[in-house]
Amino acid sequence: MTDNYAMTVLKSDELNLIDEYWRAANYLSVGQIYLLDNPLLQEPLEAEHVKPRLLGHWGTTPGLNLIYTHLNRIIRKRDANVIYITGPGHGGPGLVANAYLEGTYSEVYTGIGEDSEGMRKLFRQFSFPGGIPSHVAPETPGSIHEGGELGYALVHAYGAAFDNPDLVVACVIGDGEAETGPLAASWHSNKFLNPVTDGAVLPVLHLNGYKIANPTVLARIPAEELDSLLRGYGYLPITVESDDPKVAHQLLAAALDEAFDLIAAIQQAARYDGATQRPMWPMIVLRTPKGWTGPAIVDGLQVEGTWRSHQVPLAETRTNPEHRKQLEEWLRSYNPERLFDEEGALRADLRALAPVGNRRMSANPHANGGLLLRDLDMPDFADYAVTVAEPATETAEATKVLGTFLRDIIARNGDRFRLMGPDETASNRLSAVFETTDRTWAAETIVGDDHLAADGRVMEVLSEHLCQGWLEGYLLTGRHGLFNCYEAFVHIVDSMVNQHIKWLTSSSRLPWRRPIASLNYLLSSHVWRQDHNGASHQDPGFIDHVANKRPEVVRVYLPPDANTLLSVAEHCLRSRNYVNVVVAGKQPALTYLNMDDAVKHCARGLGIWQWASNTTGEPDVVLACAGDVPTLETLAAVDILRRELPNLQVRLINVVDIMRLLPDSEHPHGLSDREFDSLFPTTTPVIFAYHGYPWLIHRLTYRRNNHAHFHVRGFKERGTTTTPFDMVMLNDLDRFHLVMDVIDRVDGLGDHAAELRQRMVDARLDARRYTREFGEDDPAIASWAWDHQYQAASLTGN
Amino acid sequence: MTDNYAMTVLKSDELNLIDEYWRAANYLSVGQIYLLDNPLLQEPLEAEHVKPRLLGHWGTTPGLNLIYTHLNRIIRKRDANVIYITGPGHGGPGLVANAYLEGTYSEVYTGIGEDSEGMRKLFRQFSFPGGIPSHVAPETPGSIHEGGELGYALVHAYGAAFDNPDLVVACVIGDGEAETGPLAASWHSNKFLNPVTDGAVLPVLHLNGYKIANPTVLARIPAEELDSLLRGYGYLPITVESDDPKVAHQLLAAALDEAFDLIAAIQQAARYDGATQRPMWPMIVLRTPKGWTGPAIVDGLQVEGTWRSHQVPLAETRTNPEHRKQLEEWLRSYNPERLFDEEGALRADLRALAPVGNRRMSANPHANGGLLLRDLDMPDFADYAVTVAEPATETAEATKVLGTFLRDIIARNGDRFRLMGPDETASNRLSAVFETTDRTWAAETIVGDDHLAADGRVMEVLSEHLCQGWLEGYLLTGRHGLFNCYEAFVHIVDSMVNQHIKWLTSSSRLPWRRPIASLNYLLSSHVWRQDHNGASHQDPGFIDHVANKRPEVVRVYLPPDANTLLSVAEHCLRSRNYVNVVVAGKQPALTYLNMDDAVKHCARGLGIWQWASNTTGEPDVVLACAGDVPTLETLAAVDILRRELPNLQVRLINVVDIMRLLPDSEHPHGLSDREFDSLFPTTTPVIFAYHGYPWLIHRLTYRRNNHAHFHVRGFKERGTTTTPFDMVMLNDLDRFHLVMDVIDRVDGLGDHAAELRQRMVDARLDARRYTREFGEDDPAIASWAWDHQYQAASLTGN
């Protein structure tokens, strides 16, 4: 295409209309930032028309409005199915403005009509107490992407495009955001996009040149270098550069025509002509001034086109008449009286530029994924149960068992379920899924590759950020999934899950936002079985991280064995609008509950394991446990106690759902004090063996009547490369130490207990010596479970 | 350079010697992974010679050894000053092997000599209980970079290179790691490197093609696309590709010659010839097989050159004679008997290939930064104090005051202090630093740019990962710095700070590792003053995150005003081997303590503010506070209480160092129970207003005698875009609610208290109504502090 051609794409009439539509969006954006009243400027602007606190971001907004306006043209022209992801999410006013221009805003928020009173409310509510956030947010129709923390626009876009073959996800990437790590990695998502069954992502890199107070890297490298970079990422960049609106309109219209033609050609080739090579997908590089059409100079300093336009270019509009005058000139420069009629309605010929119905980007159901959500077609999870004739007599690899269930879920839901993981699906023992599917891979393949295919349902990339972001985008557009991750490294996405939880918290308060499938984590390769990788891989703190968030959204499960994991997983996959964190082991481990009991136990969330207790009455001590390894050690401790101190009345409680420990006033899953006290009698010592940092159990139980008698063992950052049993010993979570804890806390156990305590001390020393000498766990301890079979007969009373 | 030339760089003798040195490193690497005994294979290999648990990673190791060997050649040839950063940190055995070959290992660990017994110990200790980790770790001489969590190799390399003009940081980047976000962003660090005063980074992208179970993205894009990508990142790639060792040696030697020539030329041009344009720095792309020289086929499956060689290619060497036979053949293929003499010492002509003394990469002092650490030259921080004639009568912007102190630290320490931040230095009100320095910027500049210069000391990039990683690399090589960040978004580096804390924890146990400067965070724009950005920017959980880590390393400070911030900052900047988290406000806020009192208060970490209390005896209630906004609200509450309920005996305690709340058995800063009980009498109600999630205070105090009477207010994830006072009301942290809490918890206050409580309820409703109507805080409340001046006279008894 020649530049001459590009300059004639839009006929003069269309050009003018498009320009006016853009001006209307800009006017509404500025109005939101500044105006409390006088929305159509039908009177001269007075101080009291201006908000007392000016909060909002102008700089990125005109660019966002420009792209939006031109995408509208493409949508109408091609009946295209497009959603809009706003990387520069500070540009909230722009997206709200466009939703309002399209009528969606008034449909969703019926109090805000398409008239001057509606416009007044629209302006007033923005960044106003009780109103809407200043960023693109769940409150913004058409959005699946919170503005605020930057870096995730493009990865969300790809997540939205997967398995949506007709969708084009337009994704604006600010040049600030482009400096972040997650965004930099996201470009390579095109190696995981299947042109046959997935939709397209159209990245628009918006180079307005500045961040808050600095230029941006990508705006300050030579154009050839940027071009080389983007081609290296696998894209065909189409550049649009101008500071003249008329020129920019022509160039951007031509660029979008070209991009959509290329997308259509790629999809045609892949879908009908048998093309199998990864295509170069088009993208747009848009260079326009920051704060374009805003005040050029304020207080003698250049503002338009610089970082000074980032937030509010005129800061003192209530107190400084000169600023207010400039604001009025700025607002009037858009000629609102020509764009809106006297009642405040958009001129009909302008309104006609917007797409209609679900084609409006602000009303596209893909951006309100719950509307499109279809339940997973799941087999009966009980069919995957392992047989447990007696508790604690047989072993299974919990995640391996789950893998068979996931395999069949994948087989039945080829269009709406994906399994994400940073190259750890096999390592986490979920390999059964490869019996039915492959790893998603659209890059080169060679002979010898293992289960790679463009239509694979397992997405593996060595980036937790991409796994998380793809899944978020996929869920937000109405699909399902699970992220399996090493427990320690899920901290890499701490901040992303924060934002997703905040999104869910806000959207669950918006009736028009339909619930979406929960974000499910399977954390395996957990702290107690990273003995081979050592301290750098040992961290159970993700639970603490999510536990700080709103209880409406957060759930944490620690199933102790294979059948409980199946039950928990099924529950999580059916749930909506939660973040479910499931921690489960991948190593061969004892099984405790048959499927019926597992279902009941998981439904209760915690409960007495009567078969491992030796009293149905008031116990002398409660041993509680949460997590697979703590459960094993606790059962082993109980077995020692029951053999050695048979008169001691022991109750064993296993906790699957740790939020049950919270008061019912604090969490929907919380137990009432009455229930809690019946499980943990108010003055009975409790020795609690917990998977993670011990103080989390204190944080959950500090309001309980019995809290003063809770003694919690867990991970206290004593980690290294050593054997599994040495790891629990290092952290005083081992069976011997738990027995010592009981003896130390129960009065009147007598001489035999004192002697037993010394034997426990010696046993620890022996185990440690053995480990140091032979490099492995003492087989007598490692196989202890089997030797004694937890005295299954004695434990169960048979 | 032609290929022909490249193939003749090494004379035949040198080629053979280099190959043998590489084989020696490979032999020692395999030996570490597998052998318990028989280190020189002087007897046939028996089952008992093999470790019972095989833990380690072979796949990446031969490549790491190859690069190391060739860097040795360059160092000797040019007397170059080089350190080695091992991105594929799983390759621990390779780095240990090289340190051993150079003699460093035996110098550092004197029990492990350069003889067969030493070699036996070297092998045995690897991934062995009580031994060394399987990854590159603090225990590895010459390392500043933990292997484990991937993504930070290149950013650490740049951090090491800054202000080290003679240093070349060779940085191996695995193609797995290259998929991570932080690594993808790190390439652009070259826009922040000053060729005049900084050293050079030489990235070596090692494409061995596979991750754990998958191919890698960068190995599966066309060579031209990769070349384009790397040039787009601003590098000149030099490619070395071979699976024939002899060819690879020649090509790599030539490539390194070329790279070092280019580096020298760039530095010459910038330092002496006045070049100012950002250069294209050289880098190497090395394509060699994964698991090279290991077993080609195991159990009928291709292993060498595939992902199957990632960990231990032969897994059953103790139980499967065929595997053991293959292991023995593999080990003998290196001809250990020709490389080491009968006593186990490396052949002298091979040993001569290693550099000597501090030029050995394993002994380079830059990789043990504490050796090079020089104290900061700091002015007296008291000179920057704000005047506080009476508590709570004047205001200051705490971080702005700190900025003046930082300005002068920067001025005095131009070679050893940097201030990092994601484009928020001005936003966090530290702008005074720009009176003495600029923002580091080596990319293009244009007229109108604000304080950009190649030698600027303020590093701003819109990536918390880069800020954190640069600073880590800078600190680990013996320099100083501070990272200022929005509080909510520091979660982006949760996982990085985990790894750094683990590094500090381990290295503080190694006497040969000298202490380094602490990693200091200044978290501003904190949860209570992100009212304009809303929920997405409101999160105080980083404190919780670090509080889970080892108490030897972690410190958290919440200075309530400007002078306490100065005192805390100075303390942090002088400290060693800690992670210091300082949370401080940037908004105008009351000042409470003159500098003398501030120093004393900070030294104590917490204490009674007698001037705000109305009793020196036993109080009826303790109001405690930590954080600037909670302190303000608490003082306001105390003022109301003292005016309204003058007979109520109130004690006010301010906490700067929250670790003081822990028992002394749990943290070096912890108070004894006796001290604690004297501050918080064991049955007195305590209303604690805390900056962050309230349960953290419970987690710190649950062992205290008075814990049952602690009632904590803090952030409970009620966040939105609203006014500052509405934010504290939303979370029940406001003065009115604190008064209500006191009334609810102190018995016998009588009717007036009941009436006061109702007034407080009404005041909250009024404040809320005002906010919703006018969009700002009620001036009567917002200026309350000034109206009453906290009744400074009454509070202080004057």
Image (spheres, coloured by chain):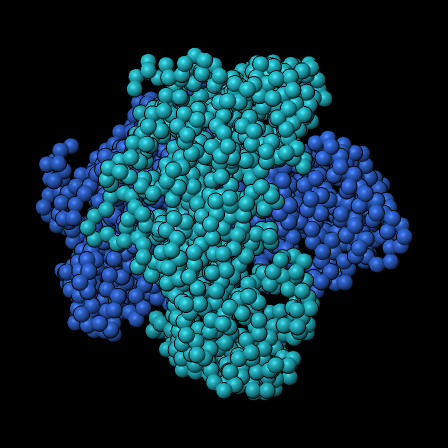
Chain colours: A blue, B cyan
Nearer-the-camera pick, B749 or B156? B156
**Quadrant placement of the C terminus of chain A:** top right
- Number of labels in the image equals 0
On the question of residue A84 being in view, the answer is no
Q: Is residue B120 left or right of residue A7?
A: right
Q: Residue at x 77, y 63 (%)?
A: A683
Q: Is residue B170 left or right of residue A523?
A: left
Among all residues in the image, which is located at the extreme top?
B12
Residue B511 vertical placement versus B296 (above, below):
below
Q: Quadrant of the N terminus of chain A?
A: top left
Name, please, the residue furthest toward the right: A751
Residue positioned 47% across, 19% down in the render: B18
Question: Can you give x and y, in whole percent of width and height, for residue A705 in the image?
Answer: 70, 64
The percent position of residue B705, horizontal first and vertical second, equals: 69, 67
Can residue B477 be seen here? The reply is yes
Q: Nearer the viewer, residue A455 or B363?
A: B363
Residue B721 vertical position relative to residue A421 in the rendered view, above or below: below
Q: Position of residue B738 (x, y in %)?
A: 53, 74
Question: Which quadrant would residue B161 be assigned to in this image?
Answer: top left
Position of B38 with respect to A100 (left or right) is right
Quadrant in which residue A391 is drawn: top right
Whole-percent x, y for residue A584 in the image: 62, 41
Given residues B415 and A748, the one toward you in this image is B415
Residue at x 80%, y 41% (from the top left corner): A763
**Residue visible at 59% across and 46% down?**
B508
